[in-house]
Amino acid sequence: MYSTVGIYAMGFLILASVFQLGSLMSFTTRSTEEIFSFFIALALIIKAIMAIVHVYSHGYVGCITGVAGELCDPAEPLLFIFLLFGTTWLSMTIISFRSSPYLSRWKRDLVSDYALPIAVLVFAFISFFGFSDVRKEQFKIFPRDTDAFFVAFYELPAEAQLPALGLSIPLAILFFMDQLLVTNTVDNKDNKLKKGSAHHWDLFVVGILNIFLSLFGLPWMHGALPSAYLHLKALSDVEDRLHNGYIQTVIVYVRETRLATLLAHLIMIPVYFFLVPYITVFIPTSIFNGTKTAYVFPELLYFLPGVFLFMAFSSLTGNEFWERILLIFTEQRAYPPTHYIRRVPQRTVHQFTIIEFVQLVILVAISFAQYHYVEMVFPIVIAAFIPFRYFILPLFIPIQYLEAIDGKH
């Protein structure tokens, strides 16, 4: 079913590229992009919180109820909290090293670009050598007989074809919206970039790639936030300038290169096929449900929520929706002299922010719904925000104010 749904969805995506339906995204405004970007950041924060709850429910609940054993092991959740926030704090501290007076400029940029891997390696060292006796939930690599294999999608029964076709429609909409929203969010004049002329070619390539991934039961992929924005910042020259009334780090130049992503993915191939098998030889194995499974680097599982938090906090930089939320709690005389604040009444700015917040809450409620069929309408809701902006929102906020707050890039 997975393979068939993926093939159908990517077929729809290819048709959308052939008929140039991406032109419809020209109607999107900054608010749609800001809400989507903020949702990604909030989703990462929620996942980190869920990880904390999971660890405490398995290692601390017994201490409260009086049950001994693994259910009462406070060392594990405390170490989890230490590694999570330690990784986040160190990565955020290192990334701010760019604006410090130490070393030369290119050295500061180099250290700042590698903030996240440096933080992960530092706390992995601390965890491995300083807390080796603490029981940790382990990150597992499955046996090689569960690797990718060709899926006989043509053997799916005829009665399952129609449900697969129905499931593929919201999936195709999700890929369509995600890919183009990410492109619009990153490729704009604020980042010293312009919208490219190959949006439909991007959709076509994404569709072809994911058809091959579907044939082998592999995870689908497309452009995503905040990784796309973090990659942009890694390729950018930045300076501290007076921007919107504050001293902010702004992008002054972006170096175009395809070598970074090409080399990154090429390096993954020998690592997977040659290094991982040797690593598993030196790591003890565990028996789980009668299946022999190799466990590698359990500390990495503890750093994932910290990585989530770092990516979430990093993506909030420059998000005007987040900045308008902060304005609600900011003294009026401390407002930055941004262009829309000088042209739009304060009450209207807050009203627009509250409406955006309601839209964000709707996205979060649908995305983290208990029932999976509710999650299926997520891409449809994102698409519905576009007509809502043009036909419903002007009933509450005058158009001239909307254009000032939420005009196109």
Image (cartoon, rainbow, N blue to C red):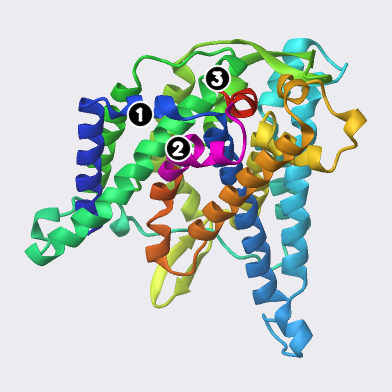
**Which label belongs to residue 386?**
2
Q: Where does the C terminus fall, quadrant-wise?
A: top right
**Compared with residue 53, is residue 16 higher up or lower down, i.e. above or below?**
above
Looking at the picture, tell me which residue is in the foreground, 14 or 230.
Answer: 14
Kindly identify which residue carries mark 1.
24
Q: Earlier in the sequence, mark 2 or mark 3?
A: 2
Amino acid type of the residue tagged 3 in the rendering: His
The residue at the point 58 percent across, 53 percent down is 297
- With respect to residue 264, does 106 lie above or below? above
Q: Nearer the viewer, mark 2 or mark 3?
A: 2
| Cα gap from disc 1 to disc 3, whole angstroms | 16 Å
Residue 24 falls inside the magenta stretch: no
User: Which three-letter amino acid code belongs to the residue tagged 2?
Assistant: Ile
Q: Residue 388 lies in magenta, yes or no?
A: yes
Crowding at label 3, few (<14), some or many (≥20) Cα neighbours within 10 Å?
some
Instruction: Tally the marks.
Output: 3
Report which residue position mark 3 lands on. 409
Cα gap from disc 2 to disc 3, whole angstroms: 15 Å
Q: Residue at the location (41% across, 69% down)?
A: 292
